[in-house]
Image: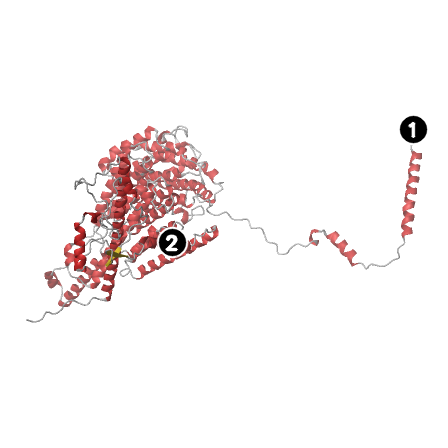
Amino acid sequence: MKARRNKKQVPSFRKLLKTSKVKLENKLKNKQFKQQSTLKKYRKEQRKLRQAVKDAVSKKPIPLEDPKKKRPGKRIEREEEEEEEALPLDMMDEDDLQLMKDLGQRASFLTRDLSSSEPVHARKQKHERVIDKYEKIPRTLQTAPEKELIHLLPIKDKSGIIPRTREKPVIDSNQDEEDQEEMEPEEEIIEEPIKELTLEEHLIERKKKLQEKKMRIAALASAILSDPESNIKKLKELRSMLMEQDPDVAVTVRKLVIVSLMELFKDITPSYKIRPLTEAEKSTKIRKETQKLREFEEGLVSQYKFYLENLEQIVKDWKQRKLKKSNVVSLKAYKGLAEVAVKSLCELLVALPHFNFHNNIIVLIVPLMNDMSKLISEMCCEAVKKLFKQDKLGQASLGVIKVISGFVKGRNYEVRPEMLKTFLCLRIKEVEVKKDTEDINKQKKFMTFKEKRKTLSRMQRKWKKAEEKLERELREAEASESTEKKLKLHTETLNIVFVTYFRILKKAQRSPLLPAVLEGLAKFAHLINVEFFDDLLVVLHSLIESGDLSYQESLHCVQTAFHVLSGQGDVLNIDPMKFYTHLYKTLFKLHAGATNEGVEIVLQCLDVMLTKRRKQVSQQRALAFIKRLCTLALHVLPNSSIGILATNRILMHTFPKTDLLFDNESQGSGVFLPELDEPEYCNAQNTALWELHALRRHYHPIVQRFAAHLIAGAPSEGSEALKPELSRRSPAELFEAYSMAAMTFNPPVESSNSKRKDKVLQGDSFLSEEISQLIKRHCSEVATQSPLDFTKYLETSVRLPTEAKLEVSDQRRMLPSGLD
């Protein structure tokens, strides 16, 4: 047989090191266990000792019996137990063993100390009491646990065998623990206390930390943008900074990370929706490039999802006024953080309508459109309006409209009117819908092989084949949605919009949403089904007659009614005279101050009611409206006056016989009744447009120009004709162009520039010519030196008073005697 090989491998140094550690741990455990056992023994002996003392005190002393009498064996008890263990027999000689056997047969062996030299048969004291016996026991109280002993070989002398022991050296664990405890405070003392910073130092430290965080964010973002597929995992690292815990820079860093991630997702997101892979696709083998692309898409979708969840949690915590356990961000700062989160959601809503989780963003944004915070509400409404304006197909708009309709119904129509005003930005117009229904692009049919063979030569067939192949590729590359799908989405969107409008008209007629509903109906009324026209007109008229509406809301009712009648409602036999009467009556109720928003609605109503329905409008009605509009132009702001005069110009061209308003002679019987609210019966043909002469002296030059143009009969040519920039614009466009909402005057007022003086006036120029010549003459004379003679001046000064006295005396002589 072959000898077995020793397959046991030599243990490595690492393994030996590991086993030595295990052995040391086991030794330490054994040592601790032995110490515990010695402590237990010590406690047990102390307990026995206390019990013996207690028994000795409580019981009466019993005298010892007569030694001659035999004591029963049961009362013979051991008072002490041998602490030493018996020696093994193989370590003793035969003589020693025989001696031990002999001693064991004697009764006195139990009470005799082997180390003593007293004879075996010593005389015992007779009247020894229990207490005396107890007192003779040496009182050695152990204050410390017994030490572990090592038994050595005994020594034999004349008195007998003396056992030997030696203390085993024990490493004191308590001392080690104390040493460790002493070391710990030393280490604590070594640590320097936190230094209190001043405000300036704190700001400098915060600026330094913030700069480091900014550099970190910039580095991660740059790496992701440079190679998104390879560095997609760094998105997670950047997103983890949303949990910044440093209270000095937590709010700022989180805001920066939110905005950075939003811009990153806008840049690296593909232009298609990423769908999850099927099990079959996961199991198939693919190339490395495809695998890398799949990993990038999966990582992008997961990180985008987590990012949206973080934004949602921030907004939710702010709405519920909640704080995290860490309290790193205060409740006051949480509002700014929530505003940044909402802004990022709005940007993603508009920028990525095609990508994953767009419906989740819609569900988050729509309730915030009705938020109590005006800033957040306006931000969300503007984002939805922007989405409606840029959505060409209508898929994203349909999703938003569904959520808004459900939200309005769930809140029982108690929402902000701005939510419904966003419907006005939908890209659904009459022209677009008609084009979609009439001009549907039919797919081009290619020629069959038989047709080509009949009509084309061989070379032509070859060219035709290449041309058809190129057209197919172009069609696939274009990937344009069919008009049928677009029309279907628009139809579904409008159905939801009209359902929302009709619910409010039916159940919440006194709601603040009514103006937005009426404005929306006015815009989309031409798309309403003809079956609803009669009922809708009845509801609109009842709203006007109720008197609960403001003049703007009633104007919206009128506008809606005529939009209905101007489209498919032409075939209906409905007399809208009551709506004309209401508009004629409402014109003098318009606000003439800064809030002249109603004038724009009036201009739109007049265009629909008079210009587009010229065949159904009588001459009396047209004259009455022109006269009232000219009167209204005297009271409103310049831009409103320009729009009204532009409307009168169109009406004069539309109804040429209205030029009789420029004559002073009355036409027919009756007197003009300006206070009457019936345009058909106010006798407007018997008045004149004297208001145009007052408007001709208006402070606004464009109003003056329009007034002079209308007085001349609104000519198309000549000196009184308007310039093309005025004549080609509609009244609504002129109203907006010359608006003073921005506190600017159009055209600008010419500044009076004072003439600049070329020469600066000197001091001499202020003097008259005579004085200046006299000054020059005296300055040019040469001064002559003459001796100073003061006596001459003294004689004249003395002579003058004496002469004056003589003149006075002469005058007294000439007077009558009674008068002096």
Left or right, 724 with respect to 140, comes to: right
Q: Quadrant of the C terminus?
A: top right
Q: Is residue 736 visible?
A: yes
Q: Position of residue 628 (x, y in %)?
A: 40, 34
Left or right, 803 with respect to 534, comes to: right
- Callout 2: SS: helix
Q: Nearer the viewer, residue 81 or 250?
A: 81
- Packing grade of label 1 (10 A; few <14, some 14-19, many >=20) is few
Farthest-out residue, left: 1
Question: At label 1, which amino acid type do we have?
Answer: Gly
Question: At label 2, which amino acid type do we have?
Answer: Glu
Q: Nearer the viewer, residue 745 or 84?
A: 84
**Color scheme of the displayed model:** secondary structure
Quadrant for residue 578, please give it.
top left
- Of the numbered discs in the image, which one, if any, rests on residue 686? none
For disc 2, the marked residue is 182
- Callout 1: SS: loop
Q: Nearer the viewer, residue 80 or 431?
A: 80
Quadrant for residue 603, please give it.
top left
Which one is closest to the eye, mark 2 or mark 1? Answer: 2
Q: Position of residue 410 (x, y in %)?
A: 26, 36
Verify CB contact (< 8 Å) between mark 2 and mark 1.
no
- Of the numbered discs in the image, which one, if any, rests on residue 818? 1
Does 777 appear above or below 532? below
Left or right, 116 with respect to 818, comes to: left
- Between the residue at mark 2 and the residue at mark 1, the CA separation in whole angstroms equals 139 Å
Q: Position of residue 792 (x, y in %)?
A: 91, 51
